[in-house]
Image (cartoon, rainbow, N blue to C red):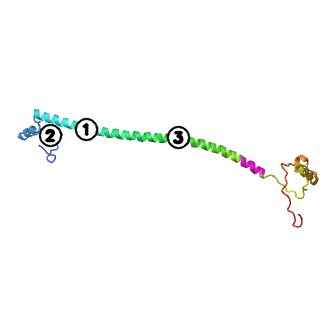
Amino acid sequence: MATPHTMRKDSSIKDLFAKPAGKKAEHIEKKCQPAPVTRSFRENLFRKLRDDIAALKQELAAVVKDIRRNMGELEQRIDSLERANDNKDGDLEEHKQEILALRDKMADLNYQLEDLENHLRRCNIRIKGVPFQADAGRLKDYVLHLFRYVAPELVETDILLDRTHRAGRPASSPGQS
């Protein structure tokens, strides 16, 4: 047979893969033939296959059991997370309602505060020398009369008096009782 080193240029690829001729070729062909299958060989083969299948079944059963256990644990975790989420949703809704109520209360308090501040910003005038003989019910009339006397050009509607009241008696001097 020609080897690649000794191959002539005109030899074909078929020559490379052609069967060798002679005694050596018969010996190689005999080695390649399978041995006859006996009954005991088949029984051993089936026994080994049954044992392998049984072992695989046991392994598979263990894996399935482990998967089921893991799935049960996951199911419990999911259930607890869903319950916690539902509780959080309820808490969130309660907090939303509480925030709305607090906003309403804050708006009312802001309105009251603004109202009080507006009352505190009134133009207060302290007039000294008003006689104490003036009756408390007639004090407002007395002050209006005083304004008309001091500023006669003002129209009575220009003068707005919300309230009039006394600030208190003057302290008596040490010589008076």
- Point out the tag, 1 or 3, that comes first from the N-terminus: 1
| Residue type (three-letter) at the residue carrying disc 3 | Asp
Q: CA distance from mark 1 to mark 3?
A: 46 Å
- Point out the tag, 2 or 3, that comes first from the N-terminus: 2
Which residue is label 1 attached to? 58
Q: CA distance from mark 2 to mark 3?
A: 84 Å
| Residue type (three-letter) at the residue carrying disc 2 | Asp
Q: Residue furthest top?
A: 39
Task: Give the percent coordinates (x, y) of residue 127.
Answer: 87, 57
Task: Give the percent coordinates (x, y) of residue 22.
Answer: 6, 39
| Residue 21 horizontal side relative to residue 128, left or right | left
Which residue is label 3 attached to? 89
On the question of residue 37 being in view, the answer is no
Which residue is label 2 attached to? 15
- Point out the tag, 2 or 1, that comes first from the N-terminus: 2
Q: Which mark is residue 32?
A: none
Q: CA distance from mark 2 to mark 1?
A: 55 Å
Image point 28% across, 37% down: which residue?
A: 61
Give the quadrant of the C terminus. Answer: bottom right
Image point 62% across, 42% down: which residue?
A: 100
Q: Nearer the viewer, residue 56 or 115?
A: 115
- The answer to if 95 sits in the magenta stretch is no
Assign a secondary structure to mark 1: helix
Magenta segment boundaries in residue numbering: 112-119
Assign a secondary structure to mark 3: helix
Badge nearest the viewer, 2 or 3: 3
| Residue 30 horizontal side relative to residue 98, left or right | left
Image point 22% across, 36% down: which residue?
A: 54
> Which of the 4 image quadrants contains residue 16?
top left
